[in-house]
Image: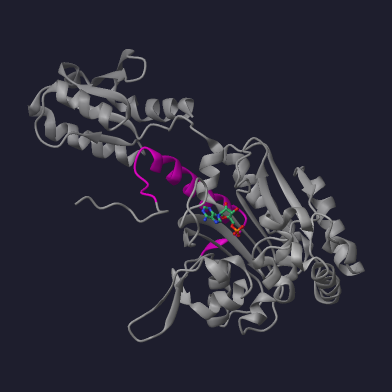
Amino acid sequence: MIFRAPKGTDDILPPDSRAWRRLLRAWDILAELYGYEWVATPMFESTEVFARGVGEATEVVEKQMYTFEDKAGRLLTLRPENTAGVVRAYIQAGRTGEFKGSYSGPMFRYERPQQGRRRQFWQLGVEYLGTEEVDSDLEVIELGYRFLSEAGLSDVEVHVNSIGDGDDRARYNELLITWLEARRDDLSEDAQRRIQANPMRVLDSKADADVVSEAPTPAEYLSDVTLTHYDLLKSGLRERDITYLEDPRLVRGLDYYNRTVFEYVPQSYQAAQSAVGGGGRYDGLVELLGGTATPGVGLALGFDRILLALGDRPAARALDVFLVIVDPSRRAEAQAFARRLRDSGVRCDLAAGERSVKAQFKAADRGDAAAAVVIGEEWDQGMVKVKDLSSGDERMLAAGDLASWAATSRAGAR
Ligand code: AMP
């Protein structure tokens, strides 16, 4: 009997896991540069948190949640996204005012698995609570854009829209309901069910794209206040040299957004699932989950899709050097040398126990080292032989210079 990972889930093993780690580290560093501190919330929450926070009439809540009863009969759900959880935590901790948090981790949605659509998938995200200022929308969009660009996606276009809030949204919803009711028979069953509960959701239903292509869009009904917010957003994007496209039909799949919504679409990645991330403003969410009214804006990037969009790029080497010990009597010295190298930040490994030189070279290859460092006769003169495992070039180097040599060649390989 061979066990397999559940359908729609993936094992992330080396060498693929290298790109994951690299991006996750880059994410942490960038988020901190912008003042977002790391937060972690449970992978499951009371089902109600998502039912309310994401919205009853959404695809995610209706069809995609992994919901179960625990032994005490509590209804729990594996998190399909992290915004509702972070907001729940903010309220529970009694926080008020501004709060900037970043997270990364697996999310769970019961979807039909395909490329870029997994049942367990990773998201990176930030939430910026406590301000309505358009600067916060811009900061969040810029952070995601910059991350994607530094990750190697240099052709990302940000699709933006404003879906209004308060009165203008209510006015628009009413109009849209009338418009949709008049075409009820042409709509899918799901869309028909959502007309009253959540009409805007019908706009991003793929099955109904033809029918709704003529529907009125939220932007046509924006109040002056919302319009100003939207105009400032767009001029801010221009100031920041962020490539964007206004998409009047963008409403996003989750229920809690108001005003700004956005998605990141890499131009060169034209797969069925083309957005690698998105987000928006959610000024009503804290109140909806039982807190005092607090505005907020956030984004989530889909890690699996970023990697797909990046395509097959040569993975960086796993190790800078692998020590090959010619004479077993030098093992203890070699191990001490390895410790010194690691202290200087050199990624270094060596074989456990006594092995032939040939076996150690094999281990160096298996470990995916950039170079083998041979500890032989010359060691007594403080020298080592360094063999570049890609080109086969060899050179003699003072052992004391190895750390700076490794740092330089690592930077060169990047
Ligand atoms: P959403 O808030 O649903 O738009 O999700 C934000 C991002 O998470 C998307 O743009 C995707 O990159 C990613 N994502 C959402 N659902 C999945 C999934 N089932 N599998 C992989 N990535 C996903």
Is residue 96 in the magenta section?
A: no
Residue 322 is drawn in which quadrant? top left
For the stretch drawn in magenta, the main secondary structure is helix
Q: Position of residue 325 (x, y in %)?
A: 16, 25
Q: Position of residue 223 (x, y in %)?
A: 90, 69
Image quadrant of ligand 1? bottom right
Instruction: Answer with left or right where residue 154 lies relative to residue 16.
Output: right
Residue 217 is drawn in which quadrant? bottom right
Residue 338, compared with residue 189, is above or below; it is: above
Q: Nearer the viewer, residue 321 or 203?
A: 203
Q: Please state the extent of the stretch shown in magenta in the rendering.
A: 10-38
Q: Which residue does the image show at 52% across and 47% down from the upper left?
A: 116
Instruction: Answer with left or right where residue 305 lies relative to residue 3.
Output: right
Instruction: Answer with left or right where residue 22 lies relative to residue 399.
Output: right
Q: Position of residue 58 (x, y in %)?
A: 62, 69
Q: Nearer the viewer, residue 175 or 184?
A: 184
